[in-house]
Amino acid sequence: MSAAQPLEVDPTAGRRSGRRLNPSLVVGGLLVLLVVAMALVSFVWTPYDPTLVDPTSRLLTPSAQHWLGTDKFGRDVLSQIIMGARTTLFVGFVAVGVAAVIGVPLGILAAMATRWCGELVMRANDLLLAFPALLLAIMFGAVFGASTLTAMIAIGIATVPSFARVVRSGSLQVMRTEYVLAARAAGRRPMSTAVRHVLPNVGSLVIVQASVSFAIAVLAEAALSFLGFGTPPPTPSWGRMLQESQELLFSAPRLAVYPGVAIALAVLGFNLLGDGLRDRYDPRLEDRR
Amino acid sequence: MSAAPRESATATADATGAGRDVLTVADLTVSVRDTTLVDGVHLSIGRGERVGLIGESGSGKSLTALAVMGLLPEDVRMTGSVRLAGVDHDLVGADERQMSRVRGRDVAMVFQEPMTALNPTMRVGDQVAEAMLIHGTRPDRRSARAAAVELLDQVGLPDPGDAARAYPHQLSGGQRQRVVVALALANDPALLVCDEPTTALDVTVQALVLDLIVRGVAARDAALLFITHDLAVVATVCQRVLVMYGGRVVEAGPVAEVFTRPRHRYTQGLLGASDLDVVDERGRLVTIAGSVPGAGRFPAGCVFRNRCPHATTTCEQTPAWTGPDAASGFACHHPAGTAADGEVVSRG
């Protein structure tokens, strides 16, 4: 007797492009694309030199010449925003990159290693978690000199524990599934189990954590710039624009609104993109939508 | 041990058409801290032989299977000996590196829950292909992929090419279990261990998957260790059966023998409980009194004596194994079928 059950394979299986796009992916993707486009454009063109100080045109309101007006030094705000996109992307990718590259393997190791070894890693993790990220960044700035790179490496290191923690709890769950047992039963080595089974199954957690950390890194850069340990002047940064607008908050609130909106949109874009990517590339979530 | 019994064993094995034993488990004991979970299990399976391991939940069946695979959790200790034909070291005490060479190639396992036994983020064809690539039984990815599709065809998945490109969630439970069987058979293992492979499936699909396992094993002349609590499944799949209770093998023998003339009171109870035509004077189905005690709370002596209607003070002593060898016999002070039921028969 032959086993002829009908095979209900989704006809779009293997052709993911055929699947419906979800709105958070589209909106998030567009916002991120906007930031990326601004950063790329800034390499070849900005309306004015964003660092050019012009005392004759201070605090101009938006006009045909200066679309978003000028700040207290007479610099063109739009040019600074466009240039600042570079800093924002740089900041986000360095901080999240450092955190993910160290945190994800650490989390998987803590979940797969023997119990005491895992505990050791996680307690060391807690120690680092208890240390304020900004303080670490200031220390790094004091030791290695204030620059965006050192500040963001410090923020990245301070974000390692949240990655490690999320990845470890996800990995522990994966380690208890039968397919990991089955992988061991099939003779798979621990290293290849980690890469082929554990990592892809905690991928959605990593993406969500990365989008959250990205937002935190952008805000941390703003805070550090305020304290003088972030992006040193005159390189434009949305965070520092926000800080410089502070003293004029009542006379020219628009100077705070523009970089604020830029930061909010970038953070929103990355969060939506993270959610959208997770929904799209996690096959298990497909049926729930 | 002299050579004589060994020769006779080989002779009988040859007479039945089976070769040297594929799996030989001797005095296997599994314990966690002070609690013994599996106690002195002896078990051997020849080539092409299908052996069932039955018992209630908590009787140590699955632990025995995991011990054979070397997949016990890290805080669980095992002693005794597990030998596999073609592997020149004992699997007990072998390190992870040695075990990963054996697992999947010489011995493979089919798990209970097809919903979770496949990686949800990998296409099933790739999972089957990788099972072969791990042990290098196919030279490259391309030929492994082709072999995987062929294997999926063998296990009766229609459109195996499409099925290979599907993710596990796109397949039904029965289809997934077919993939799991294909995965286990990918490297033509000498021994296939199945841990309740059909418990999670409905009855019609169950029959198809069982048929698949039996045919797959027969085609490879492999040995089969089949764990279940379903007596009907054992009767259709297996030739020999071991009955486990409280971490011990309480009775063993050919399926027909054990099922028609059970000797151990537990086997008798198990068979009685599975007969839905027999009711007692109050019209209730026959059951075994009480429930399986938790690990470590089994009585000393005969592990079944606190639930056994025939238990006496003699049962405080551990009953000796009665029978020609480990493959056939029982361990009971008051076996069924020797005298009138209920009468106390003094024994060992």
Image: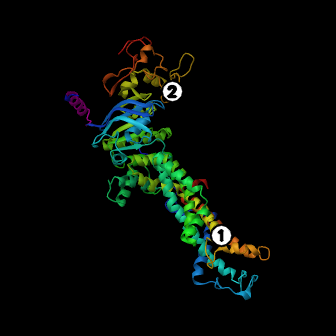
Which label belongs to residue A103? none
Q: Which residue is painted at 20% across and 28% down in the image?
A: B2
- A266 falls in the magenta region: no
A120 relative position to B325: left or right: right
Marks 2 and 1 in Cβ contact (< 8 Å):
no
Residue farthest to the bottom, as pictured: A56
Q: Residues within 10 Å of mark 2 (few under 14, many from 20)?
A: some
Residue B22 position in % (x across, y down)? 30, 38
Q: Residue at x 44, y 36 (%)?
A: B62
- Magenta region, main secondary structure: helix
- Where does residue A271 sit, x and y in percent of width and height? 62, 63
Residue A148 or B117: which is nearer the viewer? A148
Asked if residue A90 is positioned above or below residue B267 in the image, the reply reads below
Q: Which mark is residue A227?
A: 1
Residue B187 makes an appearance in the image = yes
Residue A120: percent from left, percent from top: 50, 49
Residue B293 tag number: 2
- Segment tinted magenta in the rendering: B4-19
How far is the residue under mark 2 from the one under mark 1? 66 Å
Rendering coords of residue A258 (x, y %): 71, 74
Marks 2 and 1 on same chain: no
Identify the colour scheme used.
rainbow
Compared across the picture, whether B309 is left or right of B84 comes to right
What element does badge 1 sit on?
helix
Give the chain of mark 2: B
Kind of residue sitting beneath label 1 = Leu
Q: Is residue B178 visible?
A: no
Specify few, some or many for label 1: CA neighbours under 10 Å numbering under 14, 14-19, or 20 or more.
Answer: few
Kind of residue indicated by mark 2? Pro
Quarter of the image that includes the N terminus of chain A: top left
Q: Using the image, determine if residue B137 lies above or below residue B208.
A: below
When the figure is inspected, residue A25 is found, relative to residue B324, above or below; the finding is below
